[in-house]
Amino acid sequence: MTVRIGVVGTGAIGRDHTRRINQVLTGGRVTALSDVNPDSARSVKADVAPEAEIFATGEQLIESDAVDAVMVTSWGATHEAYVLAAIAAGKPCFCEKPLATTAEGARRIVDAETARDKRLVQVGFMRRYDAGYRLLKQAVDRDIGPVLMVHAAHRNPTVPPHYTTPMAINDTLIHEIDVLRWLLDDDYVSAQVVFPRRTFHAPGDLKDPQVVLLETAKGVRIDVEVFVNCRYGYDIQCQVVGEEGIASLPEPMSIVVRKDARLQNQILTDWKDRFIDSYDVELQDFLNAAAQGTASGPTSWDGYVAAISSDACVAAQEAPGAIVPIALPARPALYD
Ligand code: NAI
Ligand code: ISE
């Protein structure tokens, strides 16, 4: 069966996911596109989805009989309405992070999905599909004993002018919020944010870098440096300290060059390249599950927990140094 995919939001990642569905993966075809900027949808159609029909609105696309499953890759604040429409239509839905921009919005999605008692939503937390993180999880589960601490860093070379201080949490740190829960099989109980000296390269009034301190239910202490104008590259670091040893996320594969009295490795600069294989694996998982009329991978519950944790981190930004508690409601059986 070829799953007919409708894509809502055809910007950077919508275009790239459309390319991978049509040119790299098996079992799916992008047959419908929609964007508030119709030129964007037309350009994606011309470049990577020649047979796709362009719909005036995301809602019309979701309701169309020519669409079996939906991919939501529009701006974060628009995700909730489209995901709810896909659930109402009974169609599997891949939603890029964040699932919703508020915890209340994510809860509405959890409630709609549990009311149908069927998984329909996969959230785009692609790091769970990354070969490096999967190896790291094996080491955490088997080799280093109980985890005591995690030291992580999320560095972007630059960010666009509209990027704000809370986005360091709900747009950037949200990847660590999800992947570290998965890595440690744990949940957060508190968050604290401290601001080091501000980089000269931060635009406007953006506070950059930031250090986020998280504590988990098992007592693990996590520090994450979020530094989104680091200049030198796109760099994701994660070191897990256990009772019996330390495990670190592998560096991306890179040619080692000896030249001009230097030993050099390339550092990537674009998130699209850093996780290119993970996006392929995550979307193949989506297509395979969608062919069965369901969803796999990171759940609406994961998206909801990420939103609750992210809200606590933003509250912690607003009261630097304060420790903000994180409390989670009971998890519905659908997500066991
Ligand atoms: P972008 O700005 O390049 O593209 C977003 C597109 O959505 C634009 O073409 C815009 O016109 C369209 N759009 C906005 N509102 C809409 C609406 N109501 N209906 C239909 N289309 C609408 O942004 P980008 O970088 O592609 O990000 C999109 C989403 O993907 C964001 O939620 C972002 O957080 C997520 N993302 C995830 C990444 C990951 O590593 N998993 C990486 C980059 C983005
Ligand atoms: C972007 O939206 C992403 O998801 C990238 O993975 C992240 O590194 C970047 O900070 C975000 O803005």
Image: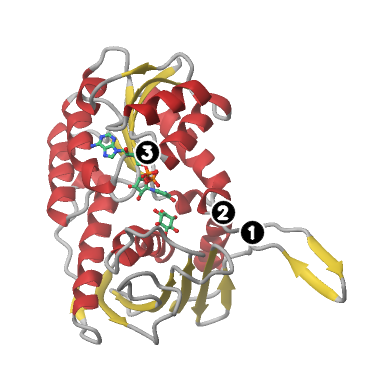
Can see residue 62? yes
Residue 6 rendering spot, x and y as whole percentages: 35, 24
Residue 249 rendering spot, x and y as whole percentages: 57, 66
Is 282 situated above or below 206? Answer: above
Residue 203: name its quadrant.
Answer: bottom left
Front: mark 2 or 3: 2
Residue 258: name its quadrant.
Answer: bottom right
Tell me the SS state at disc 1: loop
Under mark 2, the amino acid is: Arg
Tell me the SS state at disc 2: helix
The residue indicated by pointer 1 is 252
Residue 215: name its quadrant.
Answer: bottom left
Decide: marks 1, 2 in contact (CB < 8 A)?
Answer: yes
Q: Residues within 10 Å of mark 3 (few under 14, many from 20)?
A: some
Give the residue drawn at x 17%, y 56%.
103
The residue indicated by pointer 2 is 274
Under mark 1, the amino acid is: Pro
